[in-house]
Every structure is written in structure tokens, then in C-alpha cells.
């Protein structure tokens, strides 16, 4: 009897120990799950903030549906209905990619957070010299979607207005808000049909448009030097453009630039006309 009693007490103690251990393990795991869940929802929270802001944007009068995917965070359909309700435009965000062919934004999570914080703008995050270049934010076309040139131009304008909060819309143009393309650091100001604007900071020793594939554009442009002096060749002619001067480059004319001075050069580039 004594042995049986001892056995029962030992069994109960073992069961109680396992119960307590399981409870402690469950308690230890719970915060991890909660933290992971909050991280997964952070992208959606940021997107909802952009949606709320866009309901007050006059450009939300234009109907549009696009997809947004943030790797390892989720995917959504953004629908701008063009309808107004109680003084605000209707802008919807739903889980999953669009059911009909359209554009899809793919945004790295860190880049989404940087755009949200105003550290970089969306057009700069998408900027590239060649279609094969890597970008932390990109746009692709779903299978079966055949956009026109006007569709692409309108999307550029939408990319600026949706991904820039507030009114009037303000974006930074400083070195820590840049990316690199064409051989130097740049910030895209604004794109729409017939107009493209950007700012370049060309460091000593850098060469811009040195690759022959990018030396001629199908539209005219003007380079406005706002700091320093830049050297270049335009249609075979050597040219020096110093601070306070502007150079005009006709459409389909080859040009390249370099900074052989000890100080950075800053240039505002305006591209315009048909094809821009």
C-alpha cells in the first residue's frame, strides 16, 4: 500500500510538472507570435495611411485599380472609384491582387517604410537607366494587360500623388534621398505626359550618360546647373556649363557629361515634349 501511495504521489507530481512546463512554454511563445503578427500588419497599416490621405487628393477623381505587393508582407488591390462621399473621394484597399489585368507595384518593405517616412519619393525609388536595372520599387504589367503610352504617363503622375502625402505635396531632394542611375545620384521630381523633371548630384570624377545606349533621348531636354561646373560633349561639340547657366539638348542628340573638378555639381534636368 505504501508503495502504491508513493507511486500515485509521484505520478501526480509528474503530471503537475508537465502542466506547469507546458503553460510556461505557451507563455513564452505567445509574445513571439504577437510580435510576428504586428510586423506582418505594418505594411498594411502604412498602405491604409496612404489610402486615407488620398481620399483628400484632387487626383483621386480619376478612376484606377492597381495591385500592390510587399514581399513577405502581403498583397492588396487598390481601387480608386472616382466617386465622392461626404466630401472625400472613395479609395478602397482589399486583400489580394486584382482580378482584372492592370499594373502591379512591387515594393520592398524597407523602401515602403522609407517612402512613408518621407526619406525618399516613389518615383525616385522606381528610377532606372535601363529596363533590366534593379529597383527597390517597381511596376509590372499583369498578363493580358496592354497599356498605352498615355496609360504609362498617367501612372507616373499617380505614383507621385498617391505615394506623396499631404497638401501641398513636398518631396526631399538631398543626397540621402537619392538613388543612382546614369552614373550619378538623382532624385525624380515629377513625371507626367510631356514632362519629366529630376535633380542630379554629380560627384568629382563621376561621368553621366557615359554608356552609348543612353546618350540620345527621343525628346529635348534642358540641363540647369545650379552648383559647380560640368563638362560635356553634345553632338560632338565640347561644352562647359557653369553655375547659373542652362544647356539645351535637342531630341535624338547624343550627349555625355563628367565632373573633373574637386567639388560636386548639381543639375536640374527638365525633359519635355512628345515622348517625354
Image (cartoon, rainbow, N blue to C red):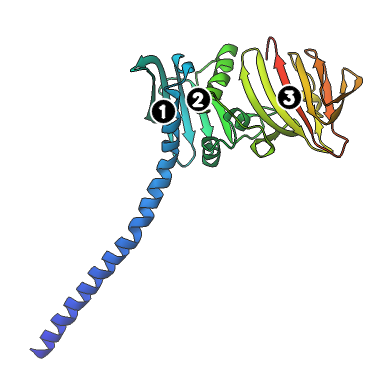
Residue at figure coordinates x 60%, y 35% from the top left? 120
In this orientation, which residue lies closer to the viewer: 209 or 87? 87
| Residue 130, visible in the rendered structure | yes
Q: CA distance from mark 3 to mark 1?
A: 32 Å
Dot 1: few (<14), some (14–19), or many (≥20) neighbours within 10 Å? some
Residue at figure coordinates x 77%, y 22% from the top left? 224
Label 1 SS? helix
Q: Position of residue 21 (x, y in %)?
A: 28, 69
Label 2 SS? helix
Q: Residue furthest left?
A: 1
Look at the image and tell me in which quarter the N terminus lies.
Answer: bottom left
Dot 1 or dot 2, earlier in sequence: 1
Dot 2: few (<14), some (14–19), or many (≥20) neighbours within 10 Å? some
Residue at figure coordinates x 81%, y 23% from the top left? 244
Q: Position of residue 275 (x, y in %)?
A: 68, 12
Q: Is 226 on the left-hand or right-hand side of 55?
A: right
Q: Is 257 on the left-hand or right-hand side of 18?
A: right
Quick check: marks 3 and 1 in contact, CB under 8 Å? no
Q: Residue furthest top?
A: 274
- The residue singled out by tag 3 in the image is 268
Determine which of the numbered discs, if any, sits on residue 66 in the image. none
Q: CA distance from mark 1 to mark 2?
A: 10 Å
Look at the image and tell me in which quarter the C terminus lies.
Answer: top right
Label 3 SS? strand
Quarter location, residue 157: top right
- The residue singled out by tag 2 in the image is 162
Amino acid at each position: 500500500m505504501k508503495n502504491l501511495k508513493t507511486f500515485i504521489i509521484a505520478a501526480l507530481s509528474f503530471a503537475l510538472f508537465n502542466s506547469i512546463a507546458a503553460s510556461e512554454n505557451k507563455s513564452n511563445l505567445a509574445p513571439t507570435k504577437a510580435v510576428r503578427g504586428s510586423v506582418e500588419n505594418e505594411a498594411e497599416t502604412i498602405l491604409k495611411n496612404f489610402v486615407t490621405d488620398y481620399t483628400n487628393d484632387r487626383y483621386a477623381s480619376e478612376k484606377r485599380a492597381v495591385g500592390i505587393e510587399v514581399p513577405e508582407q502581403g498583397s492588396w488591390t487598390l481601387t480608386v472609384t472616382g466617386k465622392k462621399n461626404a466630401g472625400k473621394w472613395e479609395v478602397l484597399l482589399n486583400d489580394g491582387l486584382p482580378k482584372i489585368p492592370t499594373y502591379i507595384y512591387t515594393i520592398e518593405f524597407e523602401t515602403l517604410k522609407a517612402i512613408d517616412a518621407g526619406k525618399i519619393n516613389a518615383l525616385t525609388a522606381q528610377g532606372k537607366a535601363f529596363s533590366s536595372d534593379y529597383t527597390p520599387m517597381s511596376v509590372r504589367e499583369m498578363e493580358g494587360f496592354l497599356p498605352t503610352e498615355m496609360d504609362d504617363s498617367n501612372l507616373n503622375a499617380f505614383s507621385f500623388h498617391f505615394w506623396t502625402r499631404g497638401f501641398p505635396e513636398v518631396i526631399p531632394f538631398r543626397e540621402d534621398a537619392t538613388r543612382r542611375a546614369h552614373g550619378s545620384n538623382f532624385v525624380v521630381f515629377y513625371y507626367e505626359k510631356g514632362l519629366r523633371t529630376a535633380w542630379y548630384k554629380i560627384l568629382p570624377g563621376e561621368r553621366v550618360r557615359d554608356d552609348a545606349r543612353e546618350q540620345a533621348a527621343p525628346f529635348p531636354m534642358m540641363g540647369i546647373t545650379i552648383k559647380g561646373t560640368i563638362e560635356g560633349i553634345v553632338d560632338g561639340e565640347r561644352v562647359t556649363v557653369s553655375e547659373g547657366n542652362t544647356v539645351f539638348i535637342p531630341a535624338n542628340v547624343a550627349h555625355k557629361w563628367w565632373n573633373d573638378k574637386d567639388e560636386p555639381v548639381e543639375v536640374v534636368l527638365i525633359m519635355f515634349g512628345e515622348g517625354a
